Image (cartoon, grey):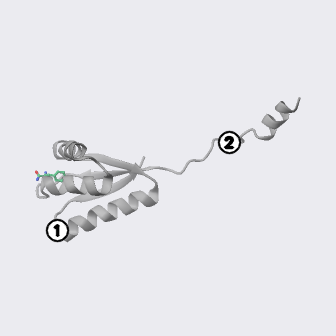
Amino acid sequence: DGKDQIELATKPRAKTQRPPLYKVLLLNDDFTPMEFVVHVLERLFNMTHAQAIEVMLTVHRKGIAVVGVFSHEIAETKVAQVMELARRQQHPLQCTMEKE
Ligand code: TYC
């Protein structure tokens, strides 16, 4: 019947390409207030207050943590937004991105 032909005609040639994802990482420092970091996580990463506290404390204890995973463009925007909020308040908070 025609079913085999349809399957042959639509057989994928190679693994489907997915756009690479990027981890957005927040770095600890000794000066940025905990409340500011919590605010940034709530505001830019759509975390609840409880989630934001938990992630902030992970960064504080471990030195670094992933705060989200995004497409390259969104990750770049998030990093720029974190850095801009920190700069405006003169906090040394650092945020970076890394291919997953
Ligand atoms: N270590 C900072 C303090 O004790 C708090 C902090 C947490 C700073 C997370 C940055 O990404 C950070 N005030």
Relative placement, left or right, of 93 versus 5 is left
Distance Cα–Cα, label 1 vs label 2: 49 Å
> At numbered mark 2, what does the secondary structure look like: helix, strand or loop?
loop
Viewer-side residue, 54 vs 13: 54
Residue bearing the label numbered 1: 89
Mark 1 falls on what kind of element? loop
Name the residue at 27% across, 68% down: 84
Q: Is residue 28 placed above or below 85 in the rendered structure? A: above
The residue most toward the top is 1
Q: Which image quarter holds the N terminus?
A: top right
**Disc number placed over residue 22 in the picture, else none:** none
Ligand 1 within 8 A of label 1's CB?
no
Q: Nearer the viewer, residue 1 or 20?
A: 1
Question: Which tag, 1 or 2, sits closer to the chain's start?
Answer: 2
Residue at the location (81% across, 37% down)?
6
In this picture, residue 11 sits left or right of residue 65: right
Find disc 2 in the rendering and name its residue. Answer: 14
